[in-house]
Amino acid sequence: MTTVLPAPAGVPAVGWASGPLGLVQACDREVSRQSALRYRAVAAFALSRPASVDRPQGTRGAMAAERWAARPELLRSVSEWATQELSIALSLTAAAAESLLTTSLTLMHRLPATLDALEAGAVHGGHVTAMLDHVAPVADDTVRAKLERDLLAWAARRGAVCTPAQLRDKARREVLKRKARSAAEDLARAITRRGLSCRPDSCDGMAVVSALLTTPEAAAFMAALGAYADALPDDGRTRGQKMADALLDLVLRPGEHGLSPVQVVLTVVAPVGALLGGDQPCEIDGQIVPAEVVRALLAALTGARVTAEDAATEDAPAPAEDTATEDTAVEDTAVERPAAGDPEDTVPDVPADATAETLADGWDEPIPAEVLERWAAEEDARTADHILAGRDDPIPERVLIRWAAEEDARVAGQPPPGWSPPRDDLDPDDHADHPEDRADDDPDPPPDRPGPPEPDGWWARADHAVNDAGAALLDAEQAIGRARRLVATAESADTADETAWAGSPAGRVTAAADAITTLTAATHDARLDLADLLDRTAGGGLADRPRIAVTHALTRALLALTDLPDLRRATRAGTGLHAPSETDRYRPAAALDRHVRARDRRCRFPGCRRPVPKRGELDHATPWPAGPTTAANLTGFCTGHHRGKHQAPGWTHTLHPGGTLTVTTPSGLTASTQPPPY
């Protein structure tokens, strides 16, 4: 590879642009410089947190052997608690903080020239990523340093543009030419990263599951799912949808395939309003989902009717059980509505003679565009027939053309177009029967009356151009007028829809400020459905009976966790509801354990979103037996942060009476968290 001298430090390879673009270049180079300073500072912080303060491998409470083996080699000398401290300082996830630590140490120890080029502004973050992916893994220090210098010189050559993709391709070629990396070793390292991950999709209620596999495994995996999908009948699903359904069948319903079944426990959090047909957001294992997703899930698992069907029409509560009632039907006298769920009748038919004034009140369907266009055309015709003084609507084109012709005739001293003097030899009444007699054949105008201007010549062409421009302007004005009317109609229809929904049971349930108001706003049938759901206990599709979370009306904090039988007993006894009582031993009793996990749901460490494990990891703020085993003295953690609370040197964790947890790091940083609200 030919070595090319780089451009002078501080000057872009293509030179400085003038104007705002030059400022963009200067800002970009300053971003690169600050990024380099950040990497150096993070590396210095990592060196100040040596691994010697951690518990040695193999001792009780030390990092698990699997996690230790999966750690990057450069982090072996850094305390595992440095990641937690960095995540608090920069508001990063633990994974992002560990990645930043690894990148900083890699640049400092394996790619120092790249870090210098970043600080000088010769490269930016995209170039750094390419160097980290393809040059940093080269084992031989001499080969890696030479390759780094050559690639940086090539990227910064004068007058050339080097994108990260170009640098990545160049690095691949140069590494392969030198055989500087062993494909077998790379694959062996990559295999240790095999696994699954799950993240929420951009659409609420959906999630993305990713699997990192070897290429043969991935190919066999996709081929097998594809074969399952191809064997299914054509029922309207795409091949991808069939593959997803086949995967769920194989994993979640393996009993049909000779595999041992497993039980999956999902924690579903649903406000009472969502179960009564409202739009309040819900949770499934800590992920936010729409209320309809939870209603459908509970209906499938329990067989209970927890959907919002007929919520818009069931407005009045049912009478008392001892009163005889008669079913009544309300006839829709406006127009016939399409059947629910009919894909071919998504837009209702409007009677041909319907107008904006005669359309019956209560019409809550969208008005088709062709009807709105017809109304606009009729309005234009009415405007053409009688122009009212002070009218804001655009005047129709044909009216203006007639006015212009009449004005031209007046200026020329001629009668208006279509006018002819009466003839003495014809009866005036005969003109209606003989329209051809209306055309006056007099070819020569009187000698004192000037004739019309010649149609050719620059003046005539200019006059035609002005007329054409005026006609185009009139067309635009008419189109704008019609668009304004359509927008106004659509806004009116949308407002009517929102008003109708807000007045429906579902709308009132959604707007309710608390559970009591929600129950009052719900229909009688909806309340019966909710009671049926809560009556269902263990067995069937549920691993445990449904629990009722009693929360504070203002803070939404959990006050008590109960179920329908306990709620009825407390109501009869008048004892009220409260958190479970103290346990006289180290492990909390079942009710207290369930209460704390339902209260915290996710790890209480600042910034952590890992769920509290199903067993263990409930920490005593004041160690037992000095501190009681109560809800006020217990905090939910994930495994890693629970270990850090007891092992990380220089850290303090303070649990306040109101449930606020304050964490202070060895650097003096302070962060607080509260239990997530319901």
Image (cartoon, rainbow, N blue to C red):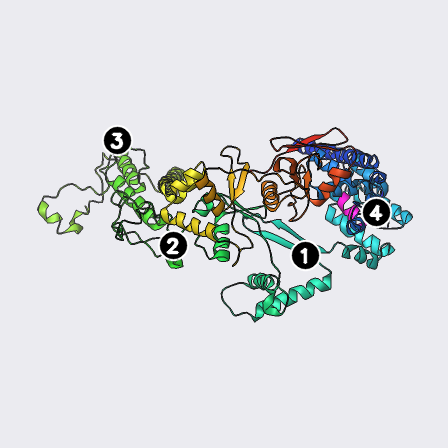
- Residue indicated by mark 4: 57
Q: Is 195 on the left or on the right of 495, as rendered?
A: right
x and y percentages locating residue 517 in the rendered image: 41, 38
Image: magenta residue range: 128-134
Three-letter amino acid code at disc 2?
Thr
Q: Which of the two residues, 209 or 460, is positioned nearer the viewer here?
A: 209
Secondary element under disc 1, as helix, strand or loop, is strand
Earlier in the chain: of badge 4 and badge 3, it is 4
Q: Which of the two residues, 46 or 321, is positioned nearer the viewer here?
A: 321
Secondary element under disc 4, as helix, strand or loop, is loop
Label 2 close to label 1 by CB (< 8 Å): no
Judge depth for marks 2 and 1 and give the one in front.
1
Which residue is the extreme one toward the right? 142
Earlier in the chain: of badge 2 and badge 3, it is 2
- Residue indicated by mark 1: 211
**Residue 228 vertical position relative to residue 125 in the rendered view, above or below:** below
**Residue 577 vertical position relative to residue 137 in the rendered view, above or below:** above
- Residue indicated by mark 3: 389
- Magenta-colored stretch includes residue 132: yes
Three-letter amino acid code at disc 3?
Ala
Q: Which of the two residues, 400 or 634, is positioned nearer the viewer here?
A: 634
Q: Is 107 on the left or on the right of 455, as rendered?
A: right
